[in-house]
Amino acid sequence: MKNNYPIIFLVLFITGGLILNFCHEKSVVKQHGRLSVKGTRLLNANGDPVVLRGVSLGWHNWWPKFWNADAVKWLRDDWKITVLRAAMGIEPDSAYLDMPEHAKGLMKTVVEACIDQGIYVIIDWHDHHAENHIEEAKAFFIDMAKAYGEHPNIIYEIYNEPVRQDWALVKAYSDTLITAIRQYDPDNIILIGNPHWDQDVHIVADDPIREHINLMYTLHFYAVTHRQWLRDRGDYALSKGIPIFVSESDGCNSSGQDKLDMEEWNLWIDWMGKNQISWVKWSISDKQETCSALRPGADPKGGWSLDKLSESGVKAREFIRRFNK
Ligand code: MG
């Protein structure tokens, strides 16, 4: 018996290796690899359609406590998310313009956690007036493209939600940002915003950006406020060959409040399913509001039992788990 330790260690080493390999194999990024866009569809590395479903972290300047690798891992393992959106606030106090290194540090933590854990991650410039911050946005996305552009996990969202700016202005901003990113990353998906909080995809449809590849256009819905009329705009955009990515959504109203409208939210889920549109729920925070996924006091590191989730958190988790096994 006295000399069995080397054998025991060898067996443990091999078993550990097999377990790690198994974990790696189940990664959605390992499964789908590098994404591309063809027509209205998001495709995986084999050229097959892929639909991503997940959640957005809340503004980093207000909810930094949830920007950590443990929370990301919990969302992957328990919610079965395949994409996480990192909403990096730009304009408020303590956000990017105020404290860029702090913001970049949190973004780096989340992006690297998503890479480690094999899910897709949206690097979101969470701005409502990005045309006023072009130089800052360019410098940030160039940094991100240089650091992470080789990884298939990365999706760039260059303008969260324009407000009343017109499409010509948002289009010009987008072209500048896309050109900057493409110097260092020729291929990862870039999400493009559009006027009125990403509700004007019908205007984009008549005048899309034609010079670049692997672009998708964001549509945001909050089901109490945004109903069939916005799905009609989406249908029109799809009919014109415009690829749509729903990078924010929920069953509440556009202020994040009100009672969930489950009938309408289900209509959206059906519409996105029918059109193979990827979607993200807003958001991981524990603010006392309908669209926040967590109840006040939820552990920043995950491990949330269902009673730590808000009603919208419970429903969104169910939707995601229904599709992402
Ligand atoms: Mg790349």
Image (spheres, rainbow, N blue to C red):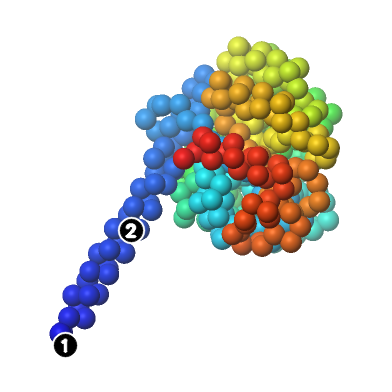
Rendered residue at 76%/35% (across/down): 260
Q: Describe residue 235's horizontal placement relative to residue 32 as left or right.
A: right
Distance, label 1 to label 2, CA atoms, is: 28 Å
Q: Describe residue 224's horizontal placement relative to residue 141 as left or right.
A: right
**The quarter of the displayed image where residue 4 is located:** bottom left
In the rendered image of this protein, does residue 111 appear above or below residue 241? below
Rendered residue at 71%/31% (across/down): 262
Specify the farthest residue to the bottom.
2
Number of marks: 2
| Amino acid on which disc 1 is placed | Lys
Of residue 306 and residue 195, the one placed in the foreground of this image is: 306
Rendered residue at 61%/62% (across/down): 301
- Indicate the position of residue 123 as horizontal and vertical percent values: 61, 45
Question: Can the viewer see residue 95 in this picture?
Answer: no
Checking the image for residue 19, the label placed there is 2
Rendered residue at 56%/25% (across/down): 273
Quadrant of the drawing holding the N terminus:
bottom left
- Indicate the position of residue 163 as horizontal and vertical percent values: 82, 32
- Indicate the position of residue 121 as horizontal and vertical percent values: 56, 45
In the rendered image of this protein, does residue 243 appear above or below residue 26? above
In the rendered image of this protein, does residue 144 appear above or below residue 321? below
Mark 2 within 8 Å of ligand 1, using the beta carbon: no
Checking the image for residue 2, the label placed there is 1
Helix, strand or loop under label 2: helix
